[in-house]
Image (cartoon, helix red, strand yellow):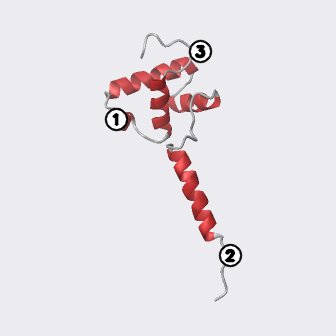
Amino acid sequence: MTLTARPGAPLTAAEVEALALTADGLTAHQIAHRLNITRSAVLDRTAAARTKLRARSTTHAVVLAYRTGQLDLDGPDSVLRKVCVLAEQLYTATHQPRRAA
């Protein structure tokens, strides 16, 4: 864990990035591969975020970061945003009135 992390401090961009990728369902190994860093560095970033947010788990840290406005889960590149757009398109396509032949 990062020794400089203190409860209540704002999250760094690296910590937010690690939490955002976690929210998208990636594992620490996958995040490390995507960011070209070590798995240990990913774990350090999420541990620092947990400390700063006083979270009990990484999942709790994601929720708290979102609630405090430090993590945007609705960004244009988020998996959640893409799923919502696809769900809306599917709904629209399946609920169109049928045309008479």
Residue shown at 50% from the left, 29% from the top:
58
Q: Earlier in the sequence, mark 1 or mark 3?
A: 3
Q: Earlier in the sequence, mark 2 or mark 1?
A: 1
Q: Earlier in the sequence, mark 3 or mark 2?
A: 3
Q: State the CA–CA distance, disc 1 to disc 3.
A: 27 Å
Question: Residue 96 placed where, x, y %?
Answer: 65, 72
Q: State the CA–CA distance, disc 2 to disc 1.
A: 47 Å
Type of residue at label 1? His
Closer mark to the observer between disc 3 and disc 2:
2
Name the residue beneath numbered marker 2: 97
Q: How many numbered marks, from 0 up? A: 3
Left or right, 79 with respect to 35, comes to: right
Asked whether the residues under the numbered discs 2 and 1 touch, taking CB atoms below 8 Å apart as contact, a structural biologist would say: no
Residue shown at 48% from the left, 25% from the top:
13
Say which quarter of the image contains residue 66: top right
Looking at the image, residue 96 lies above or below residue 11 = below
Identity of the residue furthest to the bottom in this view: 101
Asked whether the residues under the numbered discs 1 and 3 touch, taking CB atoms below 8 Å apart as contact, a structural biologist would say: no
Residue shown at 57% from the left, 64% from the top:
90
Q: State the CA–CA distance, disc 3 to disc 2.
A: 53 Å
Task: Characterize the local packing of mark 3: few (<14), some (14-19) or many (20 or more) Cα atoms within 10 angstroms.
Answer: few
Looking at the image, residue 52 lies above or below residue 17 = above
Of the 4 image quadrants, the one containing the C terminus is bottom right
Say which element carries label 3.
Answer: loop
Question: Residue 59 placed where, x, y %?
Answer: 53, 33
Of residues 99 and 17, the one drawn nearer to the viewer in this rendering: 99
Type of residue at label 3? Gly
Say which element carries label 1.
Answer: helix
Of residues 47 and 92, the one drawn nearer to the viewer in this rendering: 92
Type of residue at label 2? Pro
Name the residue beneath numbered marker 1: 29
